[in-house]
Image: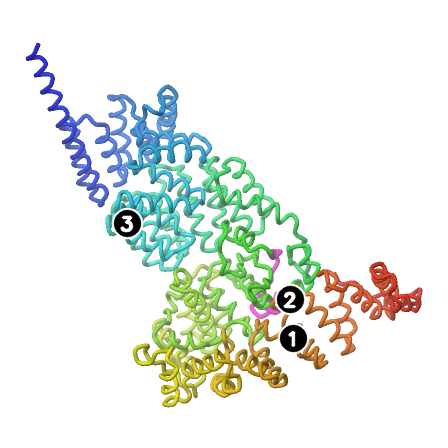
Amino acid sequence: MRGIFLIAFSFAVIQSASGQDSKSEIRSSKSLFKTGEYEKCLESAQKAIKDGAYSIEWHILQTECLLALGRYEEAAAHVDTVLRGSRPDICLLWVAHTAYQHANQAEKSTMMLATAYRIASYRRSEYLTSAEMVALGQCLLLLGVEPRLILRDFYNRVIERDPNCREAYLAAGSLAAAKQDYELAAERYRQALKRFGDDPDVHHGLAKAFYYSDRKAMIASLDAALHVNPRHAPALILLAEHQIDCEDREGAAKSLDRALAVNPWHPEAWACKVVLAHFANDPNAVNTCRDSALKFWPKNPQVDYLIGRKLSQNYRFAEGADCQRQAIVFDPNYLPAKIQLAQDLLRLGEEHEGWTLADAVNAKDPYNVEAYNLVNLHDALSQFKTLSADGLLIKMDKHEAAVYGDKVVGLLQQAKSKLCDKYGLKLDDTITIELFPNQQDFAVRTFGMPGGDSFLGVCFGRVITANSPNAARPSNWQSMLWHEFCHVVTLNLTHNKMPRWLSEGISVYEEMQENPIWGQAMNPQYREMILDGGLTPISNLSAAFMNPPTPMHLQFAYYESALVVEFLVERFGFVSLKAILADLARGEEINTAIARHAREAEAQNPASLQEIEKSFEAFAKKRAQELAPDADWEQPARDQVDPADREAVARWLADHPSSFWALTLHAGSLLADQKWEQAKEPLQKLISLYPAHTGQDNPYRLLAQAHRKLGETEQEAQVLGKLAALSPDAADAYDRLMEIGMEQKDWMQVAANGDRRLAVYPLLSTVYRHLGQACEELGQRERAVESYERLLLLDPADPVDVHYRLAQLLQQGDSAGAKRHVLEALADAPRFRQAHKLLLSIPTESTTIREKRP
């Protein structure tokens, strides 16, 4: 007996040691997989299996290697063999499902999910390993179980009971990202990085979580993933997506080639190749690449979904929508294609079908954040008022529409007439414009998600979405709408086939053509960036919008784009610009179009794109050097002159009397010390050196402050008047000028600045009161009536007085209206004697009835 016991004990020890060795070998092989040495990992797994390794993990690893290398049929054949000779394992079933799917064996693929469900139905969850729980959750997700339940009852539960289960973090992050819950996705991936260290799958997941919110962080995560595994195909494909968005098509092609060198049949890599072929206007390549993407899985909905999503991200919504419809034909239950199609349709103005689809996705998948947001937004939009005129459909908050909706309609009609005529566009489609008083509603309508704080408006071609004017964020809404409608013109002219830089550049350029103080002008920051070599080459200018290091760099991208358009028009003529747009509509690449029309415009001395870029750089530098040429722009290093050391600044100023930097600091110090009189001299000098400076803390505003503190109202008004004439959004200056105008009864000044103020924020009751009174005094009866009527919509402090004034103004032309207003006044103030007298004096009939404002 003792001998038998010793033999049994020895066998157990040997078996235990063998198990430890096997686990060590598996970890070593998985390390090869992690670093992208898929062929070596495959050899290792095959050898272990041949040598009799019993763990199912070896078979799973071999299958994963074959899948990573695009050897789909071999992967399916291997799982066939394994499944015939072993007890079904849920992790193996999940991998087998993937293998069969990619090998176009749909029936077997579906059977794997059903088998996993059947096993789970008779095994209690506590007897499943953590990895099996995650795999089961992935299977159930595809079988239609509510995603939020999968996240809670499978992935999160595994993380709670087994924090070292890497697969649970990856699955939870992937599910959250797929449902647009990017914060949760990022949280799960960060937790995985802390626990498991550098892992390419985790870094890639984190990059996907950042894709729509922080491209800089996304690039950092992709770099980390590719540092660990330079052959990580998903990371290379996501990098290519980013490069496509930046219009770096050559870089995207190289990234995709790297991915295809690992897996020659990677469907997503070939799908991105299809996108590049679309942009190259190469229909043969489109078909060839799409055939390659669908070679092993002909009804893979992910292929057309990805193609369509990338096309839509580049504003080709009609083509994107067609792709999503095809994806839905392949798989009628593929929700990512349905919600993307809903967004495409909404951006194309096809609202009924778009909202219906969003509602259907929300009903099917309540965890889909984008669908949920859209459904709630639809409820809010149903309360909007719709204004229509001249092919324009404008949706606004009811209250805002009543106050200034007609002004919006008038401005857009003017923009449509002037810009369509200028660019030769016959616009037959109805253009929808939606103005949102709630910024988050604007973001959801525009991007599908909250955020987008830096955007005022966005144009999709036939649809414009925009923020309503905001009192706390002064910005000229008139210039914004002009800018966005210019996008309507250029996008329709090119069938949405234009680079972002050109689209934005023309819109900013046309702002300035309509009103010289709209758009963007050279400023000290732009001057420094240009002269320090901060220009982006024309051939890569769209990339400047995608990953700007600071908000200033993003604004500079807009400015540089407009400067390029100005340069092209000045050098080659406006006809060349229109011809470039026509070429883009035919699918030609922008750099080729620019070079061709440059040659045609300058036949005697044709220039290449590289020469054009050099000429533009010289043009931009000349413009920068022309900014305040008498100012001294030199700025000492901090170790040379400490800005906080007033004496050091004074010494610098003594040696550099025209120093913009030193004059600004010196004036600021004097104002801080309330030395109002002394501050006037440096501020006046700053204005004389740089009269166009209207940026933050500009010398006009500071000099006006000094004059006001000294009681010099006339001088204050003169300074503010200059600022008001130069700036489209100097709200404080407009307010103060109206205040001074009311005190001095300078009604022209009140009226002029009232109009300026309403172009920034049209919902201020005080402005309408001042405007009404000014127009009364100037004899502008119709404008006075209009101002007072708008004032009544804004809950004025003294409605009785407003009604009385309106009755007085209307008594000679609209007796019915006059009587209505005087009765309104008397209803609130029955003892108002003057109103009683006015009521008695109003004629009972009137031969002229004033036309009501729409």
**Residue occupying the far front of the picture:** 673
Q: Position of residue 512 (x, y in %)?
A: 54, 74
Q: Hey, what amino acid is under mark 1?
A: Asn
How busy is the neighbourhood of tag 3: few (under 14 within 10 Å), some, or many (20 plus)?
Answer: many
**Residue occupying the far top of the picture:** 1
Left or right: 511, with 256 as reference point: right
Q: Name which of mark 1 and mark 2 comes first in the sequence.
A: 2
Quadrant of residue 57 within the rendered picture:
top left
Q: Hey, what amino acid is under mark 2?
A: Leu
Q: In the rendered image of this protein, does residue 794 appear above or below residue 619?
A: above
* Residue at the spot of label 2: 411
Left or right: 176, with 201 as reference point: right
Quadrant of residue 152 within the rendered picture:
top left
Q: Is residue 254 magenta?
A: no
Foreground residue among 174 and 245: 174
Q: Which residues are magenta?
A: 412-436
* Residue at the spot of label 3: 225
